[in-house]
Image (cartoon, rainbow, N blue to C red):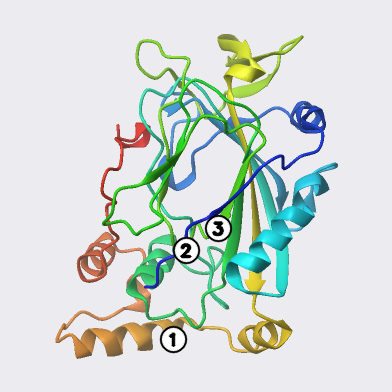
């Protein structure tokens, strides 16, 4: 699999940051990150760190005011230059709030999409295996990512492996306010570092907890009616992420969209590669939910563990 080029750092991204604060307030509350990092969690048990998230643009839904990021001309221009592309189609904007994390977030690449194959019709483990196998690059949808930061907080830097997972990471930390990194987070490992305010470990909340404004400049976490955390917004690590599909030109876009991958195509490509490797393993489409099949494929097509990755709060 090809590596991503180092990301581009943009400064003074938003003309009036107060506009973003108003957006954050208007679209509260925010709920704990879960998904594939914490599947099947008891909605009442306090098992999740205080990492809160909300989608502003997702599956065609656009929150009022989020065009500030969705159509940001600086992002579109940076993505065009980064990929040498003319077609940039923004499709997602989402927000992270993080606080009191005594370890890092997961060291990861963002989840891939392919023409004809995405999370709506293909198990996530298989999509990620398709990425790391390198067998499906001609079908992969290139996705530019911009990460923008509201403020500078205690910790909260971003580690990123611009030279590949077998080399030490670079860190963007300090002077992060109103900056953004634009690049390819689907092929570049990245990880959030520990976030203050520091205390005794990482407080946990239930999946039902909510973060929202609490008067003045303070925000609070409520969990089943209990206030479990309160801090000024300036003390909370706030980032806004933007994603766009990218094509070199309209002809490339049209050709790729006209040739979607079927599951039979995926199985055929894997089986041919496995046969060439002398392996008897095959992709049995009737066993995609089998942990044994997933584990067997992970041995043949392993996902790297990047050098210098920090322990993750989600590994506990």
**Mark sitting on residue 264:** 1
SS class, disc 2: loop
Q: Residues within 10 Å of mark 2 (few under 14, many from 20)?
A: some
Viewer-nearest of labels 1 and 2?
A: 2
| Separation of marks 1 and 3 at Cα, in angstroms | 32 Å
Q: To which residue does mark 2 refer? A: 5
| Separation of marks 1 and 2 at Cα, in angstroms | 32 Å
**Mark sitting on residue 165:** none
Q: To which residue does mark 3 refer? A: 183
Could one spot residue 67 in this view of the protein? yes
Q: Are marks 3 and 2 in contact (CB under 8 Å)?
A: yes
Residue at far right of view: 64
Q: Between disc 1 and disc 2, whose residue precedes?
A: 2
Looking at the rendered image, the quarter that the C terminus falls into is: top left
Q: Residues within 10 Å of mark 3 (few under 14, many from 20)?
A: many
SS class, disc 3: strand
Percent x, y for residue 215?
76, 9
SS class, disc 1: helix
Tell me: residue 208, above or below residue 142.
above
Task: Give the quarter of the image for residue 53.
Answer: top right
Task: Give the quarter of the image for residue 251.
Answer: bottom right
Q: Between disc 3 and disc 2, whose residue precedes?
A: 2
Q: Between disc 1 and disc 3, whose residue precedes?
A: 3
- In depth, the one of 138 and 58 nearer the eye is 138
């Amino acid at each position: 699999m090809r590596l991503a080029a180092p990301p581009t750092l943009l400064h003074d991204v938003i003309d009036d940051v107060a506009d973003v604060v108003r957006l954050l307030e208007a679209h509260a509350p925010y709920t704990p990150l879960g998904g594939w990092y914490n599947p099947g969690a008891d909605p009442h048990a306090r098992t999740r760190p205080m990492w809160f998230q909300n989608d502003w643009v997702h599956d065609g839904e656009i929150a009022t005011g989020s065009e500030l990021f969705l159509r940001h001309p600086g992002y579109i221009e940076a993505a065009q230059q980064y990929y040498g592309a003319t077609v940039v189609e923004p499709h997602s904007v989402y927000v992270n709030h993080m606080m009191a994390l005594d370890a890092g977030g997961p060291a990861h690449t963002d989840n891939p999409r392919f023409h004809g194959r995405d999370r709506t019709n293909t198990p996530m483990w298989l999509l990620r295996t398709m990425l790391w196998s390198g067998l499906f690059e001609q079908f992969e949808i290139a996705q530019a990512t911009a990460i923008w930061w509201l403020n500078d907080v205690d910790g909260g830097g971003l580690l990123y492996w611009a030279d590949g997972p077998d080399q030490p990471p670079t860190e963007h930390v300090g002077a992060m306010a109103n900056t953004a990194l634009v690049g390819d987070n689907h092929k570049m490992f990245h990880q959030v570092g520990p976030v203050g305010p520091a205390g005794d470990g990482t407080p946990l909340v239930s999946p039902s907890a909510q973060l929202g404004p609490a008067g003045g400049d303070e925000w609070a976490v409520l969990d089943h009616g209990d206030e479990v955390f309160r801090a000024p917004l300036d003390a909370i690590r706030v980032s806004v992420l933007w994603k766009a599909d990218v094509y070199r030109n309209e002809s490339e876009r049209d050709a790729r969209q006209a040739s979607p991958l079927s599951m039979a195509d995926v199985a055929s490509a894997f089986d041919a590669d496995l046969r060439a490797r002398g392996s008897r393993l095959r992709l049995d489409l009737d066993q995609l939910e089998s942990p044994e099949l997933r584990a067997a494929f992970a041995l043949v097509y392993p996902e790297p563990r990047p050098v210098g990755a920090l322990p993750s709060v989600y590994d506990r």
